[in-house]
Structure formats: C-alpha cells, structure tokens
Amino acid sequence: MDKKDYRFTQRPVNKRIKDASLIYGIRAIIEAITSGHDLEKIFIQKGLKGDLIDELMELVKKTSAPVSTVPIKKLNGLTKKNHQGTIAFISPVKYHDLSNLLANTYEEGKVPLFLVLDRITDVRNFGAIARSAEAMGVNGILIPTKNAAQINADSIKTSAGALTQIPVARMINLTEGITYLQSAGCKVMACTEKGTQEISKIDLRNPVALIFGSEEDGIDGAVLKFVDHHITIPMRGKMSSLNVSVATSICLYEANRQRY
C-alpha cells in the first residue's frame, strides 16, 4: 500500500473523542480493521458509493463498531485533511467477546458477576461504574454498540484507569447478550426504582448479571422483558432515585457482602 493511503493522526479532535486515534480515508480504515484494531466510532459520508466503500461496509458488518452516516460538513469539522468521506477512531482498549469472557470466568473457578449497561451515555458515570466494578471483582461489562458512552480519555480518567483493566464487551443487540448470559447460567437482574425485590433479600451468590439503565429513562422496556428479577435499593429519605454510578456501587457491594 502506498504510504500516502494510510493517514493517521493523534491530534485531538473534540472533547468526546479527543483521546482516540483518528484515522481517515477508506483504505486506512480497512487496514485498521484487518490489522485487528477495535474502532470506537466510524463516520461515513451520506451517499458515498463505490467498490472500496462496499468493501469497507462488508468488513464493518463483522465488527461491533458503531457506524454513522453523516453530512460532509460533519467530517470536515473533524479533520481538514482529505478524508475521502470516511473517518474512524481507534479505541484505546480492546473489546472482548462475551462468550470468551464467560468461559474464562468459569474456567478460572470464579462465580460470574457481570454488569450490563443499557444506554448509559455519560462518560463520567461510565468511568465511575467501571472503577467500582473493577474494585468489586466484576468479571466483565456488557454495553450496546450504539447509545453507549465512549471509552475515551474522560471515561478512563474517571475510572482511575479501571477501564484498561476490566474487560468490556460490546454487542449490537443487547438482548442477545442477555439471553446468552442466561443460557450460560447467569440470573439477569434489573435494578430500577420500581423493582419489586430489595437487593439485600435476593441471593447474589450464584452467577449474576446486573442491569443498569439510562440516566434519562432507566432500562429500556424491551430489555426488561428478558430479565429474571426486578430488584431495587430501599430508600428511606425523600429522594426517590440515585445516580446510576452510585446505585451500581451499592449493588456491587451487596453482591460482595453476600459472597465473601
């Protein structure tokens, strides 16, 4: 490949993705994918056509990277270079396969404890959750491909580096991940303020996956249909809800209290 076809820069682009390595040009993105890099985000110009873009889209289908078709103005705002209608950001971490994570957890003689984060988009909340999860021995975090906080400098900093230590899996369809966890022996529990069972009164010593939802509207109704239990944190004061990262920490502490 001609050297000029591979375009790469570490220049910060914007606050949300300033830490991720920006690459641009169709061939550069194809090479990044075939070289095994995980992509945090891919932007493709609306209406872009051709054999190379078709080749790229076929490769993208085999990854879990979120793709957005955007106006050329958006791309020009990300870089002034000749992007050829495509820009991507290389993730600072390697995403894991959920089935491998579960298999490794069982092989190591551990009782699975997983988190499922449904549409949690605030990087600071995501980072804080990851920090608590790593400290409490969570075996992995499952997030959706779209509508999830990006793993970037802000989330890694907020996590105190935990996001570089705890495995994160990413799936296009979150419900498929949930049903897989169930098929592997995990009880899937949704933590919501409308839950019917107090967390301290349910057994968390067996394989468990805890679901926490969006800061805006909680866990999606389509996801709730798949869960085994609806749990809640008892509230004694006038406030009826907690920040999602705080709620996650409380639930993980309870899981550890019961297990150890």
Image (spheres, rainbow, N blue to C red):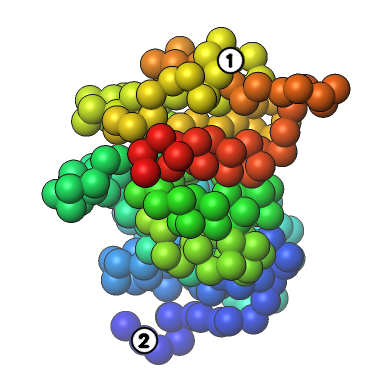
Residue 139 in percent (x, y) is at 35, 49
Residue 147, placed above or below residue 27:
above
Q: Which amino acid does label 2 sit on?
A: Asp
Label 2, residues with CA under 10 Å away: few <14, some 14-19, many ≥20? few
Residue 104 in percent (x, y) is at 20, 51
Q: Nearer the viewer, residue 238 or 105?
A: 238
Camera-side mark, 2 or 1: 1
> In terms of sequence position, does the residue under pointer 2 or pointer 1 come before the other?
2
Q: Report if residue 191 is visible in the image.
A: yes
Residue 3 in percent (x, y) is at 40, 89
Question: What is the number of the mark on residue 137?
Answer: none
Residue 207 lies left or right of residue 25; in this view the side is left
What whole-number distance in Å separates the C-alpha atoms at marks 2 and 1?
Answer: 58 Å
Label 1, residues with CA under 10 Å away: few <14, some 14-19, many ≥20? some
| Residue occupying image coordinates x 33% and y 32% | 205
| Residue occupying image coordinates x 41% and y 35% | 258
Residue 178, placed above or below residue 168:
above
Q: Is mark 2 on a helix, strand or loop?
A: loop
Q: What residue type is labelled 1?
A: Gly
- Position of the C terminus, as image quadrant, is top left
Residue 119, placed above or below residue 83:
above
| Residue 120, image quadrant | top right
Residue indicated by mark 2: 2
Q: Is mark 1 on a helix, strand or loop?
A: loop
Residue 74 lies left or right of residue 259; in this view the side is right
Residue indicated by mark 1: 195
